[in-house]
Amino acid sequence: MPFLELSLTVRIGQQPGAEEALGDLGAMSITLQDANAETPDEQAIFEPGVGELPLWPTITLNALFDADSDRRGLSETLAELLPWLELDQLLFREVADTDWERVWMDQFKPMPFGHRLWIYPWNIEPPTHDERVDAEVDRSSAPTPVVVRLDPGLAFGSGTHPTTALCLEWLDGLDGLELAGKTLTDYGCGSGILAIAALKLGAASATGVDNDPQAITASADNASRNGVADRLELFLPQDFTGAPADVFIANILAGPLGDLAPTFAAAAKPGAPFAISGILQGQQEELLLRYAPWFDELRVDSREEWIRISGRRR
């Protein structure tokens, strides 16, 4: 069944009212995009910071309606609900029905991170031990793969974004004694990918924290999918009162990373390795200064325009 898409570009201050008006008109879904992005890859909303929804100065709202919806009626009613609206701001187009789950599964392929960690979509079976050995040229040097089976659902975190990749590679690169049998806290857990990867890499238990209930649900589902649900506890930020962890990781955004530095320091044991990401190039210097009172051995690693800061709790 096709749909009618209505697109409307607004300033950031107009976004809440416009989104509410589109909802009142019966929009089946509303997505937000950067109106000034040049490519679709630049238009995704990344993991929100705790208690906030990061948006751009100019935003395009795309609302889906039934294909037989009255375009003129939608336009006139919107103009009544939004007095500042100019009708030439509205764009309509027909959108074919799409099996979005199928599209995701077709695009998301197995991906390696570091020396042994692999992220697999849930619908693709990893090779068996015999198949893997047959394919290896140097059988003696190849580490045993650690496989995380993932279905991100509505939550952020499949490994395809540079910040997630930076965090996965950091986890894979931890010394075995730093992770095996240890506790880990993942703040801003999204799909649960980092906490689950840590558990599959040898952590004894993990705690995931996220401000989005959908992320909590997705993390729980993915933990069950990977057989680690009994070792992963999940909390909304206001409910998180866990003991300091042996390892700490957070993949959110620079603003909340700065605000939450004291909270993160309290959530990490002395000597605990830690990593934070979700940082754009140019934002790292302020965060290095912010974290210096609590963390030593600070270093910066980058991928594309994104930054990871890692170090150790003092």
Image (spheres, rainbow, N blue to C red):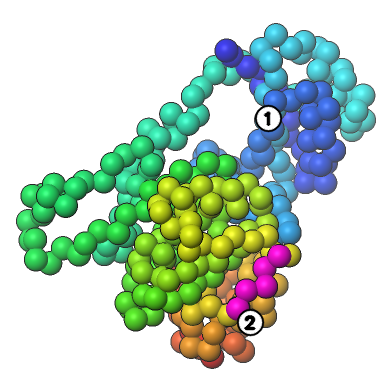
Give the distance between the C-alpha atoms of the residues marked 1 and 2, in whole angstroms.
Answer: 39 Å
Question: How many C-alpha atoms fall within 10 Å of the one at disc 2: few (<14), some, or many (≥20)?
Answer: some
Q: Is residue 256 above or below residue 85?
A: below
Residue found farthest to the front: 230
Frontmost residue, 277 versus 221: 221
* Label of residue 29 in the image: 1
Residue 240 within the segment the image draws in magenta:
yes
* Residue 17 figure quarter: top right
Helix or strand or loop: what does disc 1 sit on? strand
- Residue 55: x and y in percent read 70, 50
Q: Residue at x 12, y 50 (%)?
A: 130
Q: Residue at x 41, y 66 (%)?
A: 198
Disc 2 designates what residue? 266
- Residue 69: x and y in percent read 74, 12
Is residue 50 visible in the rendered image? The answer is yes
Q: Residue at x 27, y 62 (%)?
A: 116
Question: Magenta residues, as a range?
Answer: 239-243
Q: Residue at x 58, y 65 (%)?
A: 187
Helix or strand or loop: what does disc 2 sit on? helix
**Mark 1 or mark 2, earlier in chain:** 1
Q: Name the chief secondary structure element in magenta.
A: loop
* Quarter in which the N terminus is drawn: top right
- Residue type at mark 1? Ser
Frontmost residue, 72 versus 116: 116
Question: How many C-alpha atoms fall within 10 Å of the one at disc 1: few (<14), some, or many (≥20)?
Answer: few
- Residue 223: x and y in percent read 47, 53
Frontmost residue, 101 versus 22: 101
* Quarter in which the C terminus is drawn: bottom right
* Residue 237 figure quarter: bottom right
Q: Is residue 35 above or below residue 220?
A: above
From the viewer's perspective, is the residue at label 1 or at label 2 nearer? 2
Is residue 251 visible in the rendered image? The answer is no
